[in-house]
């Protein structure tokens, strides 16, 4: 092999090595380009997801604000309703009592112009029955006391009286009627109670 052939072979070998190195470099560049593209795509996707999440958070915050405002309005309405209910709670019973007051006023006028006390007594009795009817309608009723066994849950004893013909602790007199409102005590009956006579 002459010198010229050797040089040619060396040149070819060098060229092949250079080509291989170039190919390798190009391959690396291509690989780097692919990696960069992948990174860019992932970044874009992430930004898109973050944008969607931000929009969702903003939407939820707005809904929360609206709900808070709605709840505040609801509380104000309920407070006003409660105040109105308390303010006018007695309206029905007062309307029921107005005719009773009318009858008492008429009885007083009648009493000024007559000496017929029996009719005045009758008028007052009718008015009292009207009062009791109104109370009953409202859920209130008088406690039956006289003749009943003394019960500290419903009766308040003012004094004791000796009675031979009555069982001890029997209500024998009533000074003030007691009342229940829907079966709950609102005022006890003030009563006198029997006791056994003392043996002398």
Image (tube, rainbow, N blue to C red):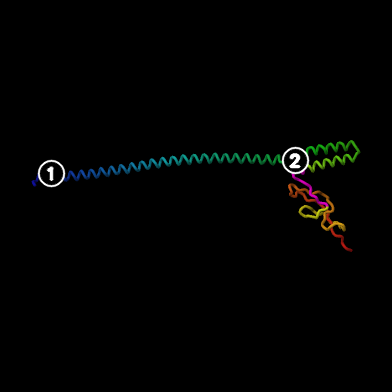
Q: Residue at x 71, y 39 (%)?
A: 88
Q: Is residue 10 left or right of residue 183?
A: left
CA separation in Å, label 1 and label 2: 127 Å
**Snapshot quadrant of residue 47:** top left
**At which x and y percent is residue 59?**
49, 39
Tell me the quarter of the image containing the C terminus. bottom right
Q: In the rendering, at what x and y percent does residue 14 appear?
A: 17, 45
- Residue at (10%, 45%) from the top-left corner? 5
| Mark drawn on residue 35 | none
Crowding at dot 1, Cα within 10 Å, few <14 / some 14-19 / many 20+, comes out as: few
**41 with respect to 22 (left or right):** right
Task: Decide if residue 184 is on the left or right side of residue 26.
Answer: right
Q: Which label belongs to residue 93? A: 2
Q: Residues within 10 Å of mark 2 (few under 14, many from 20)?
A: few
Q: Residue at 55% of width from left, 40% of height from top?
A: 67
Q: Position of residue 65 (x, y in %)?
A: 54, 40
Looking at this view, name the residue that lies furthest to the right.
Answer: 115
Q: Earlier in the sequence, mark 1 or mark 2?
A: 1
Mark 1 or 2, closer to the camera: 2
Q: Which residues are magenta?
A: 134-146
State yes or no: residue 96 in magenta.
no
Total marks placed = 2
- Residue at 84% x, 36% y is 106
Residue 135 within the segment the image draws in magenta: yes
- Label 1 sits on residue: 8
Kindly give the residue lying farthest to the left in the view shown.
Answer: 2
Q: Position of residue 86 (x, y in %)?
A: 69, 41
Determine the image quadrant of residue 9: top left
Q: Secondary structure at mark 2?
A: helix
Local secondary structure at mark 1: helix
């Amino acid at each position: 092999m002459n010198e010229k052939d050797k040089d040619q072979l060396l040149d070819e070998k060098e060229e092949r090595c250079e080509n291989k190195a170039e190919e390798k470099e190009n391959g690396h560049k291509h690989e780097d380009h692919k990696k960069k593209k992948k990174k860019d795509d992932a970044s874009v996707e992430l930004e898109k997801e973050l944008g969607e999440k931000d929009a969702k958070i903003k939407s939820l915050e707005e809904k929360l604000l609206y709900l808070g405002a709605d709840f505040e309005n609801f509380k104000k309405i309920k407070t006003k309703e409660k105040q109105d209910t308390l303010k006018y709670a007695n309206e029905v019973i007062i309307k029921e009592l107005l005719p009773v007051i009318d009858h008492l006023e008429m009885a007083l006028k009648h009493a000024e112009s007559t000496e017929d006390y029996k009719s005045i007594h009758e008028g007052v009795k009718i008015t009292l029955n009207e009062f009791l009817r109104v109370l009953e309608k409202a859920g209130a009723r008088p406690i039956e006391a006289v003749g009943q066994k003394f019960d500290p849950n419903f009766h308040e004893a003012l004094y004791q009286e000796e009675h031979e013909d009555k069982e001890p602790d029997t209500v024998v007199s009533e000074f003030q009627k007691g009342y229940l409102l829907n079966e709950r005590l609102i005022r006890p009956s003030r009563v006198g109670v029997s006791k056994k006579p003392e043996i002398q």
